[in-house]
Amino acid sequence: MNKQLYKDALGWGFLLWLIGYVLGFVLFALVPASLIGWIIMPIGILITLWLLLKKIHGNSLPYYFKVGLVWAVIAIACDYVFLVLLLKPTDGYYKLDVYVYYVLTFALPVMVGWWKLRKKNVAPPTS
């Protein structure tokens, strides 16, 4: 992996996970635990889309695929270590919202990358 891919995949991926982690602790005091993931998800989607559109500038679909794959691995590994093992939630952790979050963590970079590359490769109309 080149330096930019390390930054985009590892750096931004960990930062996105950390934002969700911190939001989870803030929301834990305010809403029922079963709703935390569903409340964080739209916020996370907006932050992720902004990041993908403004800060990530890959030049190929495999680049975005790698970013999404690393982001998903970071999310799964950090959730397991810092939520499942460390906090040991009494009602379990892995529910529908978590699985949707993992799928979106991988899929959003791929979908946005495809859209950006497709948009870039479309020739402007001639008059």
Image (cartoon, helix red, strand yellow):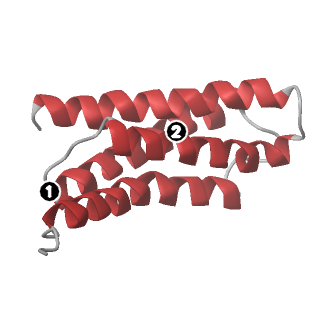
In the rendered image, residue 36, in percent from the top left (x then y), is placed at: 77, 42
* Residue underneath mark 2: 47
* Residue underneath mark 1: 60
The image quadrant of residue 127 is bottom left
Looking at this view, is 95 or 84 the one in front? 95
Residue at figure coordinates x 28%, y 57% from the top left:
113
As drawn, 19 above or below 71:
above
Residue at figure coordinates x 62%, y 29% from the top left:
21
The image quadrant of residue 82 is top right
Residue at figure coordinates x 29%, y 38% from the top left:
9
Specify the amino acid type for callout 2. Answer: Ile
Secondary structure at numbered mark 1: loop
Specify the amino acid type for callout 1. Answer: Ser
The mark total stands at 2
Looking at this view, is 52 or 63 the one in front? 52
Image-based side of 3 in relation to 73, left or right? left
In the rendered image, residue 112, in percent from the top left (x then y), is placed at: 35, 57
The image quadrant of residue 39 is top right
| Sequence-first tag of 2 and 1 | 2
Image-based side of 112 in relation to 18, left or right? left
Q: Residue at the front extreme?
A: 127
Q: In what quadrant of the picture does the N terminus appear? A: top left
As drawn, 109 above or below 76:
below
Bin the neighbour count of mark 1 within 10 Å (Cα to Cα): few under 14, some 14-19, many 20 and up. Answer: few
